[in-house]
Image: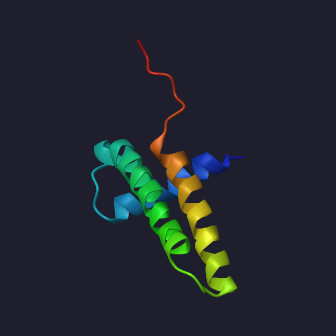
């Protein structure tokens, strides 16, 4: 049974292949996508820090979006594989 990380990487790789990314460039594109997701997650927190009077459901959705983007971005951006020597 594949782990959550394997599922996320497989799904992301399929989406990149559909977008026309060459198969050789998939690992580097996954890392770039992960870094972009981490940066995009910050964009969901900034309005919560600057604005007042935001309705509670909007706050909850923005916080859940932040958590999801950050977690998925970390999974994609960082490899836990040790480089071969």
Count of numbered tags: 0
Residue 17 position, x and y percent, is 36, 58
Residue located 36% across and 49% down the image: 32
Residue 46 horizontal side relative to residue 36, left or right = right
Q: Is residue 59 above or below residue 5?
A: below
Q: Tell me the colour scheme of the image.
A: rainbow
- At 30% across and 42% down in the image, what residue appears? 24
**Left or right of 47 in this view: 27:** left
The residue positioned farthest toward the right in the image shown: 1
The quadrant of the picture occupied by the C terminus is top left
Q: Position of residue 56 (x, y in %)?
A: 69, 84
Q: Residue at left 60%, top 85%? A: 54
Q: Quadrant of residue 14?
A: bottom left
The residue closer to the viewer here, 14 or 32, is 32
Q: Judge by depth and name the residue closer to the eye, 65 or 32.
A: 65
Q: Nearer the viewer, residue 75 or 66?
A: 66
Determine which quarter of the picture holds residue 37. bottom left
Report x, y in % for residue 11. 51, 58
- Whether residue 63 is situated above or below residue 84 in the rendered picture: below
Residue in the image at 49% along x and 35% along y? 79
Instruction: List x then y, in percent, for residue 48.
Output: 55, 73
């Amino acid at each position: 049974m594949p782990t959550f990380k394997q599922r996320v990487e497989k799904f992301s790789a399929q989406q990149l292949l559909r977008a026309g990314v060459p198969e050789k460039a998939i690992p580097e594109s996954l890392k770039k996508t992960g870094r972009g997701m981490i940066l995009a997650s910050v964009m969901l927190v900034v309005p919560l820090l600057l604005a007042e009077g935001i309705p509670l459901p909007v706050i909850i959705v923005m916080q859940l979006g932040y958590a999801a983007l950050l977690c998925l971005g970390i999974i994609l951006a960082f490899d836990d594989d040790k480089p071969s020597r």
